[in-house]
Amino acid sequence: MNGSHTYIMGILNVTPDSFSDGGSYIDVDNALRHVEEMINEGADIIDIGGESTRPGHVQISEEEEIKRVTEVIRLVRGNFDIPISIDTYKAPVARTALEAGADIINDIWGLQYDLYNREEDGVDADKIERYSGQKMAEVVKEYKAPIVMMHNDNLGRSVEERDEERIAKFLRANGCVDKVSAIKTYIVDAENMLGDLSSYHASRLYHSVEEDKVVDRVITGLLNSVKIATEAGIPEDMIIVDPGIGFAKTQTENILTVKYLKKIVESVGFPMLLATSRKSMIGSVLELPPDQREEGTIVTTVMAVQAGCKFVRVHDVEKNARTIKMTEAILSL
């Protein structure tokens, strides 16, 4: 990879219900035509997704997801010389996709599905086990595949959702098991916190659920994903991170994450992918439907280049490729 270049991941959703292009590329011929179009426009990677992860989406079975993506992956691999990413958090889907010809795993749970999805929340125990970070890491390591790990901690998309029960689950997922029963005791003075590192850690986590602390929360979450990956034996040079715009964040938090993207990139220290294309963060500001959000997407692409992101994941490849070229030309002088 060019050290200073930002690469483009073109989106191919083979889903009936994605928020922007749901149903457009279910037909294999349409999907292949779109892949060819994106390649001609400057895509460096094709990201194929078989399950919508839009707000309010319904989880589909791994069998259905495999059925949606496998043939498309095989045909893209057979017809085009371009890296293929599979957008999935399910280890069985990842394995099948890699066997079909995919090269990269794009995991929206950042190897932490099992930490943030629990039986008490109605999630099937078998799914928690099958989709666990450990299972996904095993697949990634076995196939020597790069992995994109997104920040997603299940805190919800509004402040109102963050009651003590949800915050307790967040703290538990971050290793504060013995502290959950006494959340409010974490608000102690600095001297006491420094005298008890576990309480200090819990206090920082507790305060990170506040909107203005989202950057700390994102950095912590991504570093947790990196720790899980490296401890599982995934080489550091195979790791990419994603700050998770639109996932478990309020509108204010999404904006702040993009605003302080450079700090996140520098603090985490791994190649960063920014995926904002046509998302509600942009729609809320511009008050426009998904198919009219390209100008907003382009602004975030400029900010991604300025912040040092290595990748952007977008719907409109041509406009974003031109944006990157112009931005890099300016920054190079």
Image (spheres, grey):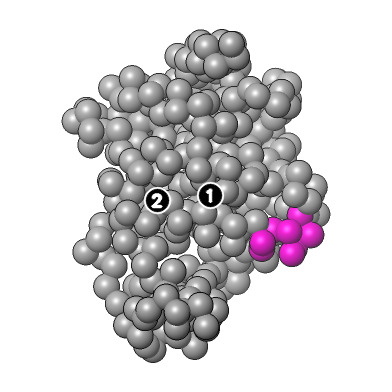
Q: Earlier in the sequence, mark 2 or mark 1?
A: 1
Task: Classify 178 as above or below 170.
Answer: below
- Which residues, given as a range, are shown in magenta? 227-234
Q: Which residue is depicted at the point 31% across and 56% down?
A: 211
Q: Are marks 2 and 1 in contact (CB under 8 Å)?
A: yes
Q: Amino acid type of disc 1?
A: Met
Q: Which residue is depicted at the point 42% across and 48% down?
A: 53
Front in this rendered view, residue 66 or 141: 141
Task: Classify 286 as above or below 95.
Answer: above
Q: Amino acid type of disc 2?
A: Phe
- Report the side of 99 relative to 125 (left or right): right
What percent of the width, then of the height, locates residue 242? 53, 44
Which mark is on residue 310? none
On-image quarter of the N terminus = top right
What percent of the width, then of the height, locates residue 212? 32, 54
Element under disc 1? strand
Front in this rendered view, residue 6 or 128: 6
Which mark is on residue 150? 1
What percent of the width, then of the height, locates residue 86? 61, 41
Which mark is on residue 247? 2
The residues bearing labels 2 and 1 have C-alpha atoms spaced at a distance of 9 Å
Callout 1 crowding tier (Cα within 10 Å): few <14, some 14–19, many ≥20? many
Q: Is residue 105 visible?
A: no
Element under disc 2? loop
